[in-house]
Image: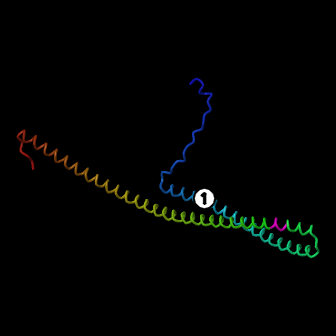
Protein backbone atom coordinates (compact mmCIF):
# COMPACT_ATOMS: atom_id res chain seq x y z
CA UNK A 1 0.00 0.00 0.00
CA UNK A 2 2.85 2.33 0.80
CA UNK A 3 4.41 2.05 -2.64
CA UNK A 4 1.23 1.97 -4.74
CA UNK A 5 2.24 5.22 -6.37
CA UNK A 6 5.33 3.48 -7.80
CA UNK A 7 3.27 0.92 -9.71
CA UNK A 8 2.46 1.63 -13.29
CA UNK A 9 -1.15 2.20 -13.84
CA UNK A 10 -2.44 -0.01 -16.60
CA UNK A 11 -5.18 1.58 -18.62
CA UNK A 12 -8.39 -0.33 -18.36
CA UNK A 13 -9.66 -1.27 -21.76
CA UNK A 14 -13.34 -0.96 -22.18
CA UNK A 15 -15.28 -3.40 -24.20
CA UNK A 16 -17.17 -1.72 -26.99
CA UNK A 17 -20.60 -0.95 -25.71
CA UNK A 18 -23.48 -2.72 -27.29
CA UNK A 19 -26.01 -0.33 -28.66
CA UNK A 20 -29.22 -0.30 -26.69
CA UNK A 21 -31.26 0.54 -29.75
CA UNK A 22 -31.91 -2.64 -31.77
CA UNK A 23 -31.80 -0.65 -35.01
CA UNK A 24 -28.38 0.69 -34.03
CA UNK A 25 -27.20 -2.93 -33.68
CA UNK A 26 -28.38 -3.60 -37.24
CA UNK A 27 -26.68 -0.42 -38.46
CA UNK A 28 -23.42 -1.34 -36.75
CA UNK A 29 -23.41 -4.86 -38.22
CA UNK A 30 -24.24 -3.52 -41.69
CA UNK A 31 -21.45 -0.96 -41.41
CA UNK A 32 -18.95 -3.63 -40.31
CA UNK A 33 -19.95 -5.92 -43.18
CA UNK A 34 -19.71 -3.09 -45.70
CA UNK A 35 -16.21 -2.28 -44.42
CA UNK A 36 -15.25 -5.96 -44.71
CA UNK A 37 -16.68 -6.15 -48.23
CA UNK A 38 -14.68 -3.07 -49.24
CA UNK A 39 -11.47 -4.69 -47.96
CA UNK A 40 -12.25 -7.91 -49.81
CA UNK A 41 -12.96 -6.01 -53.04
CA UNK A 42 -9.73 -4.06 -52.61
CA UNK A 43 -7.78 -7.32 -52.21
CA UNK A 44 -9.53 -8.80 -55.25
CA UNK A 45 -8.65 -5.72 -57.30
CA UNK A 46 -5.02 -6.07 -56.23
CA UNK A 47 -5.01 -9.71 -57.34
CA UNK A 48 -6.66 -8.80 -60.64
CA UNK A 49 -3.94 -6.20 -61.26
CA UNK A 50 -1.31 -8.81 -60.39
CA UNK A 51 -3.02 -11.21 -62.76
CA UNK A 52 -2.64 -8.67 -65.56
CA UNK A 53 1.07 -8.25 -64.76
CA UNK A 54 1.56 -12.01 -64.69
CA UNK A 55 -0.24 -12.44 -68.02
CA UNK A 56 2.08 -9.86 -69.57
CA UNK A 57 5.10 -11.64 -68.07
CA UNK A 58 3.86 -14.96 -69.42
CA UNK A 59 3.52 -13.50 -72.92
CA UNK A 60 6.99 -11.98 -72.61
CA UNK A 61 8.51 -15.35 -71.57
CA UNK A 62 6.74 -17.17 -74.41
CA UNK A 63 8.11 -14.61 -76.84
CA UNK A 64 11.58 -14.96 -75.31
CA UNK A 65 11.42 -18.76 -75.74
CA UNK A 66 10.51 -18.32 -79.39
CA UNK A 67 13.40 -15.90 -79.81
CA UNK A 68 15.82 -18.28 -78.07
CA UNK A 69 14.72 -21.21 -80.26
CA UNK A 70 15.28 -19.11 -83.44
CA UNK A 71 18.70 -17.97 -82.25
CA UNK A 72 19.63 -21.52 -81.26
CA UNK A 73 18.64 -22.82 -84.68
CA UNK A 74 20.94 -20.19 -86.20
CA UNK A 75 23.76 -21.07 -83.73
CA UNK A 76 23.34 -24.81 -84.46
CA UNK A 77 23.44 -24.04 -88.19
CA UNK A 78 26.73 -22.18 -87.73
CA UNK A 79 28.11 -24.88 -85.42
CA UNK A 80 28.85 -22.50 -82.54
CA UNK A 81 28.71 -24.71 -79.41
CA UNK A 82 29.38 -21.93 -76.88
CA UNK A 83 26.45 -19.87 -78.09
CA UNK A 84 24.24 -22.99 -78.25
CA UNK A 85 25.19 -23.86 -74.65
CA UNK A 86 24.44 -20.29 -73.44
CA UNK A 87 21.12 -20.29 -75.30
CA UNK A 88 20.24 -23.66 -73.77
CA UNK A 89 20.84 -22.20 -70.28
CA UNK A 90 18.68 -19.19 -71.21
CA UNK A 91 15.94 -21.54 -72.46
CA UNK A 92 15.96 -23.60 -69.24
CA UNK A 93 15.91 -20.44 -67.14
CA UNK A 94 13.09 -18.90 -69.21
CA UNK A 95 11.04 -22.13 -69.06
CA UNK A 96 11.49 -22.15 -65.29
CA UNK A 97 10.35 -18.52 -65.11
CA UNK A 98 7.42 -19.32 -67.42
CA UNK A 99 6.38 -22.27 -65.23
CA UNK A 100 6.58 -20.16 -62.06
CA UNK A 101 4.64 -17.38 -63.75
CA UNK A 102 1.92 -19.81 -64.88
CA UNK A 103 1.60 -21.19 -61.36
CA UNK A 104 1.40 -17.68 -59.90
CA UNK A 105 -1.14 -16.71 -62.57
CA UNK A 106 -3.33 -19.74 -61.77
CA UNK A 107 -3.09 -19.01 -58.05
CA UNK A 108 -3.94 -15.32 -58.57
CA UNK A 109 -6.89 -16.34 -60.77
CA UNK A 110 -8.25 -18.74 -58.15
CA UNK A 111 -7.69 -16.35 -55.25
CA UNK A 112 -9.23 -13.37 -57.05
CA UNK A 113 -12.25 -15.50 -58.00
CA UNK A 114 -12.61 -16.62 -54.39
CA UNK A 115 -12.39 -13.03 -53.13
CA UNK A 116 -14.93 -11.80 -55.68
CA UNK A 117 -17.33 -14.55 -54.59
CA UNK A 118 -16.75 -13.62 -50.94
CA UNK A 119 -17.45 -9.95 -51.74
CA UNK A 120 -20.67 -10.97 -53.51
CA UNK A 121 -21.71 -13.12 -50.54
CA UNK A 122 -21.04 -10.27 -48.12
CA UNK A 123 -22.98 -7.90 -50.40
CA UNK A 124 -25.93 -10.31 -50.40
CA UNK A 125 -25.75 -10.56 -46.61
CA UNK A 126 -25.74 -6.76 -46.33
CA UNK A 127 -28.79 -6.55 -48.60
CA UNK A 128 -30.59 -9.16 -46.48
CA UNK A 129 -29.70 -7.29 -43.30
CA UNK A 130 -30.97 -4.00 -44.75
CA UNK A 131 -34.29 -5.64 -45.58
CA UNK A 132 -34.42 -7.18 -42.11
CA UNK A 133 -33.56 -3.78 -40.58
CA UNK A 134 -36.38 -2.09 -42.47
CA UNK A 135 -38.77 -4.79 -41.31
CA UNK A 136 -37.58 -4.40 -37.72
CA UNK A 137 -37.94 -0.63 -38.00
CA UNK A 138 -41.51 -1.01 -39.21
CA UNK A 139 -42.29 -3.51 -36.44
CA UNK A 140 -40.81 -1.17 -33.83
CA UNK A 141 -42.84 1.74 -35.17
CA UNK A 142 -46.03 -0.31 -35.13
CA UNK A 143 -45.14 -1.63 -31.68
CA UNK A 144 -44.68 1.95 -30.47
CA UNK A 145 -48.06 2.95 -31.87
CA UNK A 146 -49.73 -0.08 -30.31
CA UNK A 147 -48.11 0.55 -26.94
CA UNK A 148 -49.14 4.22 -27.09
CA UNK A 149 -52.71 3.19 -27.89
CA UNK A 150 -52.67 0.61 -25.09
CA UNK A 151 -51.22 3.16 -22.68
CA UNK A 152 -54.06 5.56 -23.55
CA UNK A 153 -56.57 2.75 -23.12
CA UNK A 154 -55.06 1.89 -19.73
CA UNK A 155 -55.24 5.56 -18.72
CA UNK A 156 -58.92 5.67 -19.73
CA UNK A 157 -59.56 2.45 -17.84
CA UNK A 158 -57.80 3.87 -14.77
CA UNK A 159 -60.00 6.98 -15.01
CA UNK A 160 -63.11 4.80 -15.21
CA UNK A 161 -61.89 2.83 -12.20
CA UNK A 162 -61.23 6.07 -10.33
CA UNK A 163 -64.75 7.31 -11.12
CA UNK A 164 -66.20 3.96 -10.01
CA UNK A 165 -64.14 4.11 -6.83
CA UNK A 166 -65.38 7.66 -6.22
CA UNK A 167 -68.98 6.51 -6.74
CA UNK A 168 -68.41 3.62 -4.33
CA UNK A 169 -66.93 6.01 -1.81
CA UNK A 170 -69.93 8.35 -2.15
CA UNK A 171 -72.33 5.43 -1.71
CA UNK A 172 -70.39 4.25 1.37
CA UNK A 173 -70.56 7.78 2.78
CA UNK A 174 -74.33 7.90 2.18
CA UNK A 175 -74.75 4.46 3.72
CA UNK A 176 -72.67 5.49 6.73
CA UNK A 177 -74.76 8.64 7.10
CA UNK A 178 -77.94 6.54 6.90
CA UNK A 179 -76.61 4.23 9.61
CA UNK A 180 -75.85 7.18 11.90
CA UNK A 181 -79.31 8.64 11.22
CA UNK A 182 -80.96 5.33 12.09
CA UNK A 183 -78.98 5.18 15.32
CA UNK A 184 -80.17 8.65 16.23
CA UNK A 185 -83.64 7.73 15.28
CA UNK A 186 -84.06 10.19 12.47
CA UNK A 187 -86.01 9.21 9.43
CA UNK A 188 -84.02 8.39 6.35
CA UNK A 189 -84.40 11.03 3.70
CA UNK A 190 -85.04 9.70 0.25
Circle 1: element type? helix
Residue 61: give x, y in percent of width and height: 80, 69
**Coloring scheme used:** rainbow
Find residue 41 and report its image quarter. Answer: bottom right
Q: Quadrant of the N terminus?
A: top right
At x 50%, y 65%, the residue is 131
Residue 139: give x, y in percent of width and height: 43, 61
Residue 69: give x, y in percent of width and height: 85, 73
Q: Is residue 75 above or below residue 139?
A: below
Q: Is 95 on the left or on the right of 148, as rendered? A: right
Q: Is 46 on the left or on the right of 92, as rendered? A: left
Find residue 145 and report its image quarter. Answer: bottom left
* Majority secondary structure of magenta residues: helix
Q: Is residue 4 above or below residue 134?
A: above
- The residue under label 1 is 36
Instruction: Out of 130 and 160, give the one closest to the viewer.
Output: 130
Q: Tell me which segment is drawn in magenta.
A: 90-94
Q: Is 148 on the left or on the right of 99, as rendered? A: left
Mark 1, other Cα within 10 Å: few <14 / some 14–19 / many ≥20: some
At x 48%, y 63%, the residue is 132
Find residue 184 and report its image quarter. Answer: top left
At x 80%, y 72%, the residue is 62
Instruction: Out of 96 and 41, give the one closest to the viewer.
Output: 96
At x 59%, y 64%, the residue is 118
169 magenta-colored? no
Amino acid sequence: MLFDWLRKKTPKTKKPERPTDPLAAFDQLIEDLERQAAEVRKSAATLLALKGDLARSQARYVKRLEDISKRRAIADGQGDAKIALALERDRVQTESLLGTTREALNRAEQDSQLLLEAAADIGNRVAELRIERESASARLAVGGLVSTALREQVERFEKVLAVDAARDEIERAHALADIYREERGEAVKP
